[in-house]
Image (tube, rainbow, N blue to C red):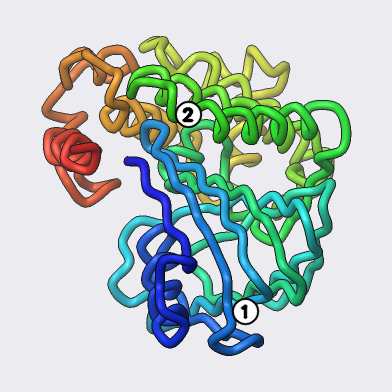
Amino acid sequence: MQATYATSDVPLQNRRHFWRDVVSNTYFPLDLVFPGGRNFHAGLGAWSMGPISISRNVSNGLLYRRRERHLANEREECFLITVPELAEIRFVQDGKDVRCRPGAFLIERSHLPYEFSHHDPAALWVLKIPSAVLRARISRPERLATLQFDASRSVGALFVDTLRLAGERIADMDDTARAVMGKHLIDLLAMVIESDDRVLVGHSSSVRNGHLHRCEQFIRTRLDDMRLTPQMVADGCGISLRYLHQVFEGEGVTVCAYIRNQRLSMSDAMLRDPSCRKSISEIAYHWGFSDQAQFSRNYRSRFGCTPSEARAAARTALS
């Protein structure tokens, strides 16, 4: 998918309605408030990169509202990673009110109401990632909503530089190259997040959360090993099996359920990847499922559709 929109092509009296439709179709349904009235100027470019998308949104001051009624018919949760370039943005969600200036980026969650605004003209890079795709790389991404990350140095700066460069060069890429680039962006984002001590905050002590983070990392690097068991995780992380179960129980999930869910998330990401030529049975086997029928049952229970339906939907979205 590639699309560009500009209010310069629309009569003044129709611009607000036009822009509401553009924004809602690009991201998800939102209400918009236009402080400047009809004298409004904006432009937006949006591109798909496999299951994720990049957009560049330039506009006068705006207030976006995501309300409870917008969530009623939404099945798939998404996360928006927003990078402001020209002006400070304000984001309010789940009782938290944050302001993000150029030199940082912000993570937003689609399945909770929010307000997003900027008083001055702004230019925003926005990366939209389905929850299932992000969960395949980052555990419990709901923890990240409203967090700001430094984009002025180190991996944070590399992530934002890559995001901008991808947006500038994406028109020259084919679908396969775009999907690969999308994976690289998610990996860079994960590196930024995992290097931040705030993501270790969970429901338990800091020591236990540190063990949890290390165990999650161990599991994610071995999901394709059918021999992966809780005992292997405990041995690999230097803790007892009993303590391993206690660590995950503190997060409301069993070790086996966490492993299964991570495998399903990775399978889902591969099913929705247009560059993937593996069959469904090959994908299931690749991520540690020896029984395809069991894989299909687990997948449907987790995502509400069969693997073949998910693959067909992803291909239809590209056509």
Residue 283: x %, y % from top left: 25, 18
Foreground residue among 218 and 192: 192
Label whose residue precedes the other's in the sequence (1 or 2): 1
Q: Is residue 127 left or right of residue 229?
A: right
Foreground residue among 86 and 148: 86
* Residue linked to disc 1: 63
* Disc 1, SS: strand
Spatial CA span between label 1 and label 2: 29 Å
Residue 199: x %, y % from top left: 74, 44
Residue 65 vs 100, above or below: the answer is below
Q: Quadrant of residue 106?
A: bottom right
Residue at screen point 68% across, 56% down: 123
* Disc 2, SS: helix
Q: Quadrant of residue 291?
A: top left
Q: Amino acid at mark 1?
A: Leu
Which quarter of the image is occupied by the N terminus? top left
Residue 1 vs 111, above or below: the answer is above
- Residue 31 showing in the rendered view: yes
Residue at screen point 43% across, 57% down: 5
Q: Amino acid at mark 2?
A: Ile
Residue at screen point 22% across, 43% down: 317
Q: Report the disc number at residue 170.
A: 2
Q: Is residue 169 left or right of residue 171?
A: right
Q: Report the disc number at residue 291.
A: none
Whether tag 1 and tag 2 are in contact, CB under 8 A, the answer is: no
Which quarter of the image is occupied by the C terminus? top left
Residue 90: x %, y % from top left: 74, 71
Classed neighbour count for the residue bearing mark 2: other residues with Cα under 10 Å, few (<14), some (14–19), many (≥20)? some
Residue 270 vs 48, above or below: the answer is above
Classed neighbour count for the residue bearing mark 1: other residues with Cα under 10 Å, few (<14), some (14–19), many (≥20)? some
